[in-house]
Image (spheres, coloured by chain):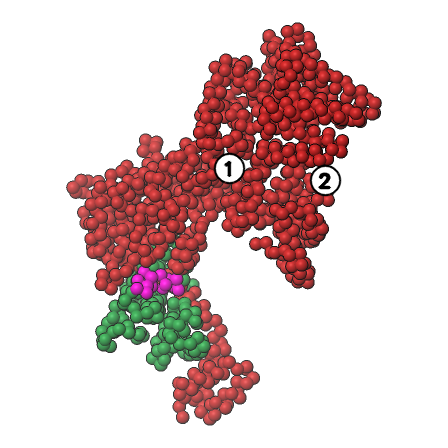
Amino acid sequence: MVEYTSPKNSTSPKSGQQDAERLLTLVYDELRKVAYSKMSLERSDLTLQPTALVHEAWIRLGGDNQPAWANRAHFFSAAAEAMRRILIERARRRQAMRHGGGQQRVDSEELEGLPESMNDDKHVIDLNDALTKLDLEDPRKAELVKLRYFVGLTIEETAKTMEISAPTAKRWWAYSRSWLFEKMAEQ
Amino acid sequence: MSARKHDIERIFSEAIELPESERVHFLDTECGDNTELRQRVDALLQAHDKSDGFLEDTGQDASFGLADSLRDSLPSDEMPGDRIGRYKLLERLGEGGWGVVWMAEQSEPIRRRVALKVLKLGMDTKEFVARFESERQALAMMDHPNIARVFDGGATELGRPYFVMELVRGIRISDYCDREQLNTRDRLQLFIKVCQAVNHAHQKGIIHRDLKPSNILVTVNDGEAVPKVIDFGIVKAAQLKLTDKTLFTHFHSFVGTPAYTSPEQMQMSSLDVDTRSDIYSLGVLLYELLSGKQPFDPTKLSELGIDAMRKLISEQDPPRPSVQVNSLNQEDRTLFAGHRGMEPEKFPKELKGDLDWIVMKCLEKNRSRRYETVNALAMDIERYLHHEAVLAGHPSKLYKIKKLIDRNRVAFGISVALVLSLLIGTATNAFLAIQAFRAEEHAQEEAQKTGEISEFIKGMFSYVDSLVELGQSQDANTRILKDTLKETFDRASMRIGDVSPDAEIEIYDILGAMYFKIREYASAEKMFRQELTKLRANSERDFPKLARTMNHLCAALARQGKIEEAELQIQEALNIQQQQLNEDGQNVARSMVNLSVIQVKKAGNVRLSDKAREEQLLKEQESIEAALEIQREGWGNEHEEIAASLNELGFILACQGGEKMAAAEVVIKEALNMNKKLLGNENPAVASSLNLLTIVQVIQEKYVEALDNYRAVQTIRQKLEETKARDVLSSYEVSVWEHQNTGAESLEALHDIVEFSLFGFEPDDLEVARLKAIQAFTYIEEGQYKEAEETALLSLAIREEKIPDHWSSFYAKSLLGGALFGQGRNEEADVLLTQGYEGVKARREQLEDFHKHRLNEALYRLIYFHSARGNAAKMDKLIQEATSLGLESPR
C-alpha cells in the first residue's frame, strides 16, 4: 500500500498515520457521493471528469476552510490515492468474476460490457503493480503519476501541488512514464 | 560499478531532449564503461520511444473506469416486502437525485399508503433525524391542498435516513402540461396554484430549497388539475450532514439540481438561503413551462465542473424565454408549440414582453431585485392574465397605455377603436379631414339613438377619461393605436351580424371614417362601399345619406389615386343631390368642391393641351366659387369648410398661374387666417394652407416670406402627428447607438417602432427608406444579414429612385454592402461598400451634425471588410484617411 503524506500538523507518526487513513476514507466516501449524485443527475450519458469530481469533493469537504487538510495539495494526495483504490478494487473484482472466482453474485447485467473492458482491467491492475514498485523506489514520482493520472491534474497543477518547478515535474513525468512502461512490458 | 538511480534519471532526462543523432555520443560520454548504467538508460529510452500516448490520456481511461467502479460500489437497495420502521415497502416508484421513493404501507396508528423516500447519499443519519425532528413541528403546521404532507422520518437499519409523506400519484408538472397540451394561460393558472402552495409554506417559515418539476406532481381530481409540491422541508433536514461536527464546521454540501438552483445557493459559503431562493427556482420552472427549455442548457451545465457551473449561474444572464424560443430549431419549436396547442409562429410573440419580464425578474442574480414574495409573483401573473400592467414590466408610458387598451379592448370592444380614431389627428388634407370628422360626428349622434352603439360610445368616453386621468396627452402614441385598430375592427366586423341594419350602416360609417383618419384608405373604401350597399338595399332610400357616403367614398378613392372611380362617385352624389329638392345646400356645395378637386387632380394626371387644361381649371374655379357662395350663405363668412374651400380655390388659381398667382396668394392667406382663428395655430389644416402659400410665394420669388412660412410649416408638422413616430424613433436611434452592445431590448423595441412607423406611408416614401435603413443597420449589428439585405435593398431602391445624389443613397449602399459581406458575398460587398463610403465622403458637407457618424460608420464598415479579408494595404490606407478626416472609430 502506498504511503501518503500525513498532515503537517500531526504530532506523531502514528497518529499521523491514523489521521491519514481516516481522511482517506473520508475522501473516498465523498468521491463516491459526488459521483453518485452526478450519475443520478446525468443518467446514462455519464462522463465523469476526475478533476471536476475531485474539486467538487474538495468543496464538499469544506475547501480551504477545512482544518483537516493542511492544504489543497494534501487533499489532492488523498484524493489521488482514493481514486486509485476505487479503480483497482473494481478491476480486481471484475477479474475475479471473469475467472469464475470470488463469492459475488454474478448476473448477466453485471457481465455486460465485460469483454470490452477486459484490457482496461488488466491495464489498471498492471499499472497499479508497476506503480507500487515505483513507489518503493521513488515515492515522490509515484505521487506525481497518481496526481496526473488519477486526478487528471496538468503538469503545472501537479508541480504546484507538489511544490516543485514545472520543468522538474515535466522531467519526472517523462521519466516515470518510461519507467512504468518498461516495468509493465516486463510483466 | 552499479547504476545509481540519480544518474539514470539525469542521463535519461538529458538524452530525451537531444536529437537522435547526438544521443549515442552523449550516452557514450556519460556512461563510459558502466554497462549497467548504460543498459538501464537504454531500456528507459526505448520505453520512452515506444510509450507514445501511454498514460497521456490522463483522466479519460480513469474516468470511465471510475464511473463504473463507483456505480458498482454503491450499496444494494431495499427490496419490496422489506420493512422500514412501521412501514412495509410495496412497490418502488422511482429514483430521484438523492433517494429512492417507495410506495409503502403504514399499519398503525392508521392503515394507509404512503410514499417513503430513502435518502441515498451517505449523510449522517443521526444529524438528519435530529434536524428532521426540529423541522417536524413546522412541517406539521403546513396544511395546504397543494402541498404533500410529511408524516414521519427516521433511519433505516442500514443507517440511511428516510422520510415518509403523503402518497402522490401524479406526474411532473412539466410532463402534465405537455401531455394535456395546456396553453399558456392554463399553464400560468396551474403555476399560480404552485405559487400559492409555496407561499403558504413560506408563511410558516419553511423554505423548500429544491423546487423543480420532479418535486411538483400533478394529479387530476374531478377533472381539475391539482399540483402537489413534495419534499418540503426535506432538503433542510438533509442538508448539514456532518460526519464529524468538530471537524466540519463549515461543511455545507451541495444539494439540488443545478439548473434550478439559485446563484446564492450555488455559493457554498453563503448559508443564508431564504424564500427568494425558492422564487428563483420557481422562475426556472416557469421559464421551462412557458418555453419548453430551461434557462441554461442542462447538458452543458453538467459538463462543467462545479466552479464553472457556479460561475455561469452566478454571472451569466440566460436568454429571455421568447429569445430562447426564437432560437429553437424548427423541429423543437413545432414540437413545443404543439405541446401548447399553438401555431409555432406565434410561440415567441406570446412570451415576448410581460412574460419575459416576469420570468426574468424571478431569475435576477441579485435576490433583492427578485419579487419580494412568492405571492407578489403570483399576483403579477394574475395581472398579466387580466391585461393589467405587470410590476416586472417596463415603467414606460407606452407600455401602460398599451395595457389600458388591451383591457378596454376586452371591456368595450369596438369602442376602443373609436377612441383611438379620436386620438389620432392625422389627416393631412384639411378638407378631407373635416369630411371624415363630420362622418364620425354624425355617426355618433345617430349612434346615441341606437341602443347597440350607445354602449360603444359610453365605453369610449370612459376610456378617454381614463387616459386623461393618466395624464396622457393626445400624442400618446399613434403607434399603439394603429397596432390595436386592426384587431379591434376585425372583432367589430364579427359582431356586425347581430345588430340591426341601421346600426350596421352606422358602424360602417364610423369604421370608414376611422380608417380614413389613420390613412388606411383601402380599408376605408371597403367600409364605405359596404355602407353604400346597405343603404341601397334599404327600401326607403335615404338619399342625403347616400350622397354623403358617396362623398366619403370619393375621398377615400382619391387618396388611393383612383381618380376615375372617385370622379364617378362624386358625379353620382351630385346627381342625387341635385334631384333632391329638400337637399341641404351645404351638402351640394361639398360635393361640388370635391368634384372640382378631383377634376383638377385628374387634369394633372392626363395630358391635356394647354388650352383644354386652362378651360378645365377655369371651370373648376367657377364651380368652387359657386360652392363658396352657397357655403357663405349658410354659414356666414367664417367656417372650417369655407376655409377648406378657399384653400382649394387658391390651389386652382395657382395652377392657372400668371396673373392669377397673386389672387391665389390672397385667397390662400384668407384660408390660412380663417383656419388659424378657428382651429388654432398648430393644426394640419393650417399647415396645409401654409404649405400652399409657400409654394405660391416661391413661384412669385418672394423668398423671404416663403422661407418664413416654410419654417412655420416644419414647426407645425414637427409638433403634429407627422413627426410623432419620428421623435420616438430618434430617441431610439440614440439608444441604439448608446447600447450597441447591451441593448437587445432597445433593438427589439426599435424594430417594433419601425414596423409601426411604416404604417401609413406610401411604400416608396422617403421616410420608409429612412426607417428601413435604420432597421438594416440594427440587423447588421445583430448579425441577421438576410434581413439586413432585404431592408437595405428597399431603402436603397427608394433613395436611388428619388434622391440618387443624396448622401443617404450612398449610405444605403454601404449598408447593403455590409449585409452582403455578412453573407460572404464578398465581391458584391466590395463594390457596394466602396461606392457607399466614397459617395458619403464626397457629400460629407451635406451631413447634418447628428448624421456625421454615418461617414465613420461607412468607412469602418469598409475597413472591417478589408481587415477581415486580410487586405492590409487597403486597410492602412483607409485608416490613414480616417485620421486625416478626423474620424474616430465607432464603438
Q: Residue at x 64, y 56 (%)?
A: B886
Which chain comes out green in the rendered image? A
Q: Residue at x 31, y 46 (%)?
A: B275
The chain ID associated with circle 2 is B
Q: Is B611 on the left-hand or right-hand side of B156? A: right
Residue tagged by mark 1?
B346
Residue B830: image location, x then y, percent: 69, 53
Q: B758 and B34: which one is in front?
A: B758
Q: Nearer the viewer, residue B738 or B46?
A: B738
Quadrant assignment for the C terminus of chain B: bottom right
Above/below status of B421 relative to B808: above
Residue position marked by numbered label 2 in the rendering: B801
Using the rendered view, name the quadrant where residue B433 is placed: top right
Residue drawn at 55 percent across, 85 percent down = B22
Name the amino acid, label 1: Lys
Specify whether B703 is left or right of B443. right
Q: Secondary structure at mark 1?
A: helix
* Parent chain of label 1: B
Give the image quarter of residue A91. bottom left
**Under tag 2, what secondary structure?**
helix
Q: Quadrant of the N terminus of chain B?
A: bottom left
Q: Position of residue A70 (x, y in %)?
A: 30, 70
Question: Label 2: how many residues lie within 10 Å, few (<14), some (14-19) or many (20+)?
Answer: few
Of circles 2 and 1, which is in front? 2
Q: Main secondary structure of the magenta part?
A: helix
The local crowd at label 1, few if under 14, some if 14 to 19, many if 20 or more residues have their Cα within 10 Å, is: few
Chain B colour in the picture: red
Amino acid type at circle 2 is Glu
Question: Please, is residue B139 above or below residue A124 in the view?
Answer: above
Q: Residue furthest front?
A: B704
Q: Which residues are magenta?
A: A50-65
